[in-house]
Image (cartoon, rainbow, N blue to C red):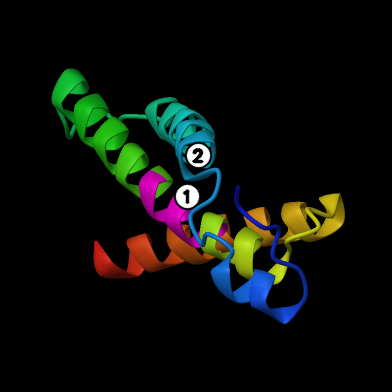
């Protein structure tokens, strides 16, 4: 039988990527979906290649957000307080969105 570890040792052995699959699914759905809903100027770009690019970029951003959000939730917010979770989600999305726009320009 396995023993329940409590105290400081429990924090050290806590999995850093607990719920990663769940967070990845939701981040990719939301960020990918919102990216796919972006406007395409058809006078400059062909519609479907631009939509595929937006969706691919959105899914990539969703995966990056999921990694950072999972780490932040498991290391800094193990109690899963809603306010901390929402603030973390908004800050991570904004940081990744700004970082992507800087890197892609």
Residue extending furthest front?
1
Assess whether residue 64 is covered by the magenta stretch. yes
For numbered disc 2, what is the local secondary structure? Answer: helix
Q: Which residues are magenta?
A: 63-69
**Mark toward the start of the polypeptide (2 vs 1):** 2
Q: Quadrant of the C terminus?
A: bottom left
Give the residue number, with chain letter if any, for mark 1.
Answer: 66
Q: Is residue 1 above or below residue 27?
A: below
For numbered disc 1, what is the local secondary structure? Answer: helix
**Residue 105 visible, this angle:** no
Task: Tell me the crowding category of disc 2: few under 14, some 14 to 19, or many 20 or more residues within 10 angstroms, Cα based.
Answer: many
Give the residue number, with chain letter if any, for mark 2.
Answer: 27
3D distance between C-alphas at marks 2 and 1: 6 Å
Q: Are marks 2 and 1 in contact (CB under 8 Å)?
A: yes
Task: Tell me the crowding category of disc 1: few under 14, some 14 to 19, or many 20 or more residues within 10 angstroms, Cα based.
Answer: many
Residue at horizontal 42 percent and vertical 44 percent from the top: 62
Residue at horizontal 85 percent and vertical 55 percent from the top: 83
Along the line of sight, the residue nearer the viewer: 1 or 39 = 1
Along the line of sight, the residue nearer the viewer: 89 or 23 = 23
Q: Position of residue 44 (x, y in %)?
A: 17, 34
Q: Does residue 10 appear to the left or right of 35 in the view shown?
A: right
Q: Main secondary structure of the magenta part?
A: helix
Assess whether residue 54 is covered by the magenta stretch. no
Along the line of sight, the residue nearer the viewer: 11 or 84 = 11
Q: Does residue 60 appear to the left or right of 77 in the view shown?
A: left
Q: Does residue 91 appear to the left or right of 105 in the view shown?
A: right
**Residue 96 visible, this angle:** yes
Disc on res. 95? none
Q: Is residue 86 above or below residue 38?
A: below
């Amino acid at each position: 039988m396995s023993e329940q570890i409590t105290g400081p040792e429990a924090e050290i052995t806590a999995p850093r990527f607990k719920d990663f699959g769940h967070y990845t699914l939701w981040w990719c759905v939301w960020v990918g979906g919102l990216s796919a809903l972006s406007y395409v100027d058809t006078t400059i770009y062909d519609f479907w290649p631009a939509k595929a690019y937006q969706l691919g970029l959105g899914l990539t951003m969703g995966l990056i957000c999921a990694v950072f959000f999972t780490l932040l939730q498991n290391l800094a917010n193990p109690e899963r307080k809603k306010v901390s979770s929402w603030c973390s989600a908004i800050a991570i999305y904004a940081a990744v969105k700004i970082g992507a726009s800087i890197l892609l320009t």
